[in-house]
């Protein structure tokens, strides 16, 4: 399993993320997106996905990063996040709508451990 139980629980509780992609000529782009989990795959959709920069960037490079984050508390300050970087593929969902499917290669997480403070060694790991 790629995600820990706490990471998967967190990802399944959230609906908004930011996806970062880069074009074939190196132009970066970041955009807010809705997402869902399909096992260990992150699935991004959209109203008209085929007309977006993220769609064309994934088509050109096959790579993406996604960040899901929030604040569990502001007093005390307790940020939480999961960041996923990996290969990205264009596909369709069960209704035939276009999707971007991210297969994680590296996962970072923070604020999901005991007391919201994982050890530094728990922050990043390669999962390929």
Image: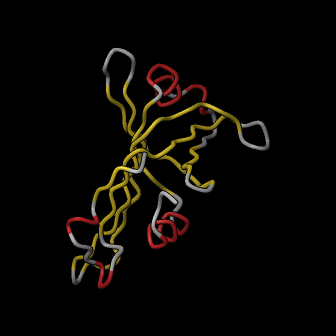
- Extreme residue in the right direction: 95
Give the total number of marks visible in the rendering: 0
Horizontal arrangement in the rendering, residue 108 relative to residue 48 (left or right): left
What residue is drawn where x is 23% and y is 83%? 75
**Does residue 11 sit above or below 43 in this rendering?**
below
What is the x, y in percent for residue 13?
53, 69
Q: Outermost residue, top direction? A: 25
Could you tell me which quadrant the C terminus lies in?
top left
Residue 68, given in percent of the width and then of the height, sits at 41, 57
Relative placement, left or right, of 14 versus 120 is right
Residue visible at 45% across and 53% down in the picture: 17
Q: Nearer the viewer, residue 22 or 119?
A: 119
Q: Nearer the viewer, residue 13 or 5?
A: 5
Q: Residue at x 53, y 60 (%)?
A: 15
Question: Residue 27: x percent and y percent?
Answer: 32, 22
Quarter of the figure with residue 45: top right
Name the colour scheme.
secondary structure
Is 92 above or below relative to 6?
above
Where 7 sits versus 33, above or below?
Answer: below
x and y percentages locating residue 64 in the rendered image: 42, 37
Q: Quadrant of residue 51?
A: top right
């Amino acid at each position: 399993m790629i995600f820990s139980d706490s990471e998967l629980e967190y990802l399944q509780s959230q609906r908004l993320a930011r996806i970062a992609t880069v074009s074939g000529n190196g132009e970066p782009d970041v955009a807010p997106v809705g997402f869902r989990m399909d096992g260990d795959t992150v699935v991004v959709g959209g109203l008209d996905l085929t007309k977006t920069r993220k769609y064309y960037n994934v088509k050109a490079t096959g790579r993406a990063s996604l960040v899901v984050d929030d604040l569990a508390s502001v007093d005390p300050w307790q940020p939480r996040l999961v960041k996923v970087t990996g290969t990205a593929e264009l596909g369709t969902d069960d209704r035939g709508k276009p999707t971007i499917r991210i297969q994680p290669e590296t996962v970072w997480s923070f604020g999901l451990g005991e007391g919201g403070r994982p050890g530094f060694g728990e922050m990043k790991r390669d999962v390929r």
